[in-house]
Image (tube, coloured by chain):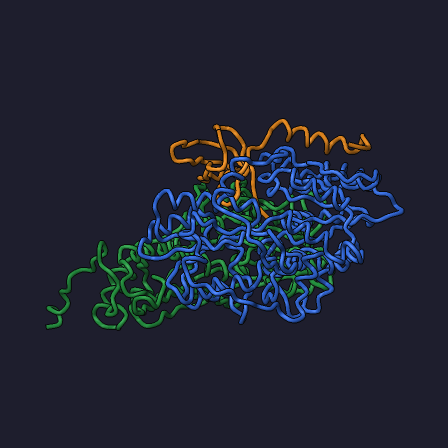
Chain colours: A blue, B green, C orange
Amino acid sequence: MKYIDEFRQHDLARTLADAIAREARPDRSYHLMEFCGGHTHAIFRYGVQDLMPANVTFVHGPGCPVCVLPVGRIDQAIRLVERHDVILCTYGDLLRVPASGRKSLLKAKAAGADVRMVYSTTDALKIARDNPGREVVFFAIGFETTTPPSAVAVKQAHAEGLKNFSIFSNHLLTPAAIQNILESPEVRELGSVRIDGFFGPSHVSSIIGTQPYEFFAEEFQRPVVIAGFEPLDVMQSALMLIRQINEGRHEVENEYTRVVTREGNVKAKALVAEVFELRRSFEWRGLGTVPYSAFKVKESYAGFDCERRFDMPAVAAADNKGCECPAILRGAKRPTDCKLFATVCTPDNPLGSCMVSSEGACAAYWSYGRFRGAAKNSAERA
Amino acid sequence: MSAKLKSLHRLDLRSGHVDMSHGSGGRAASQLIEELFVRHFDNELLGQRNDQAAFDVGAGRMVMSVDAHVISPIFFPGGDIGSLAVHGTVNDVAMSGARPLYLSAAFILEEGYPLADLDRIVASMARAAREAGVTIVTGDTKVVERGKGDGVFITTTGVGIVPEGVYISGDRARPGDAILVSGTLGDHGVAIMSSRENLQFETTIQSDSAPLNALVADMVAAVPDIHCMRDPTRGGLATTLNELARQSGVGMMLRESAIPMREEVAAACELLGLDPLYLANEGKLIAICPLDKAERLLDTMRAHPLGANSAIIGEVVEDPYALVQMETRFGGSRVVDWLAGDPLPRIC
Amino acid sequence: MCLAIPARVVTVDRDDGTAVVSLGGVKKEVSTALLEDVAVDDYVLIHVGFALHKIDPVEAERTLALFAQAGLVGGP
């Protein structure tokens, strides 16, 4: 598979691993936050950590839109589909996320609600066309990568004069989240969360470009490298971050040049600007309330905003007591620091979103990393 | 009078539907059995029309297995619920090293299900049974009200005989053993995904659903001391290996680059964000045998059409945690864990 | 986040705003609404049924070369 296999080559991994080992100074450690769930996944799936020297560690950030979606928003969707006869279309990622009262979209479906998994907004529009007598609501989640498709869907529905289609907008902005982390007391004042550099998200950046990160690099004096999400991209980006840190630089560099440019996808950005506007504030799971961090549908497209079409009272839902997702999402704690991890909270019985989403730090750690110590011992003995 | 009553119209296999009378044990039910099931399955034991089938079994240990099939969609590229029901049970019996002999088949039909589709399914079962060298000797039919079933559910039980000297069991894997797989993984899982509504894409991938008993017979003849065999159906290779690891109290170390996989299956998994190690296979088996027999077993498997792409994919190791680990293509290592729920496509 | 995969454009339907892409022999129809001019044999990044961006072949080669050079050069 072109542009995939070449970026997973074993021998190049060794070359990069050697370079990193040479250039990472032994007298210090490097804490590199990978904001994006795709990077978390790549690191674990390919065992990239094994190829790093001991003084280079990855800190997992909140770049997983499923992980940071507040429970209350899922509760709202479940209530919508239980109380009104809507067809709720959702991406697969959301089906098993635990909501309040031990419910989930999957369980609501089992209880008779019309919840349907779709791969694309195109599928949801088709369902709306095929069911003119039913209301169809699309649960729109995702960062800036996934927002343009929702914008296109709304415009398409408008152009076709569809009367039964709307979206539940939970689209989020990446720069706002990064800022929130960098401004958090743990990072800024206390220094209890060490972040020496950032891996910038691959595909969000293909849309927004590298330009929005320039502010962070400057303001917070941390290097940012926009990294592709194949394992060789991650390693090369780690090398670039280590070099910047060694040289005392804090610039925005782009490793993912085959896809990301400074201005990004201008057409996609324009489409988003036409359909969406910023919410004054939005509550993120784990990060609290973050200003200007989420999108809602503009007034001009109000008919396609399900929050205006239906009576959907906000639901204030609390996270499970003992669930450390908030701290884990901020990089302040590791999955193993959570008392619920691997005891009560497992992939079979997830209590928090970090465990449910396959990009979540806890799920990734469970699948790939939880026996690291034990696994290494077994492998060495074998 | 009975002769007159016998002259019902023939079953309308083109445009008729299952109705409640077909499960009631009366004349309509009898007609369904005669004109559909018995006609297709057509064998002496079934032809006796008893409620049970009596047969001799040779020397050796008897093996029995049961499987219920509720798959949706009912017809998929490379098979249907009928052929799957036959292959699944034939394979379960064969995984013990046994030669499968007889199957039973119980049908739960939903009121309203088209007889044309039922005819197609039963014909497919008959074909699958003939191909596998087994006979369906007894069966049952029930009908449930519309809305209480998903078209057709089929439960098959199979019996077979294990030859002397063969003792294959999930708890027999030992450190040092080789782990083999009989061919490409993930084909069935992707074939099913590609037929499901909302996940349309054109692929050339067919389900690998197939009867493995002939392959197993060759394997057991060449290497009677095979320790474990299992077919990685629901949950895929990962789940099956974890089961075996736990049963035997051992660990496993796999090599990702050794795992056979079709390019289209790998590509479909990339597109949907699925891990192929967790996808179902319906015509493949995993075998674990002593290392010094591995090459011989591999050659035997490769000589059979259903094992042409067989490979040695790893070895059993000592491990108190019974972990299944894998050396990735990239050079790092990862743990291949149990699956939590069905694999779902993801955007993240 | 944002699982996106590079695939090759096989056919383009300008009227419909769609294209068929191929990855390892698997074909899928995707929307081209987010791109300006998509041509057959272009490689595009696919995410939730949409083509997000073209892959620049020159930059791809350059990146691969950078990986190989990592051992030789110390510094950007």
The answer to whether residue B303 is visible is: no
Q: Position of residue B348 (x, y in %)?
A: 57, 50
Q: Which residue: 56% across, 41% down?
A: C5
Q: Position of residue A153 (x, y in %)?
A: 44, 45
In the depicted view, which residue is nearer to us: A185 or A210? A185
Q: Position of residue C74 (x, y in %)?
A: 82, 32
Residue A291 figure quarter: bottom right
Residue A198 figure quarter: top right
Q: Quadrant of the C terminus of chain A?
A: bottom right
Q: Quadrant of the N terminus of chain A?
A: top right
Residue B112 figure quarter: bottom left
Q: Is residue C63 above or below residue A276?
A: above
In the depicted view, which residue is nearer to us: A233 or B221? A233
Q: Is residue A362 left or right of residue A311?
A: right
> Residue lying furthest right in this view?
A27
Q: Position of residue B284 (x, y in %)?
A: 53, 52
Q: Is residue B169 left or right of residue C63?
A: left
> Residue lying furthest top in this view?
C58
Q: How many marks?
A: 0
Q: Is residue A246 above or below residue C72?
A: below
Q: Is residue B8 left or right of residue B76?
A: left
Q: Is residue A56 left or right of residue B8?
A: right
Q: Which residue: 55% across, 58% down?
A: B235
The answer to whether residue B81 is visible is: yes
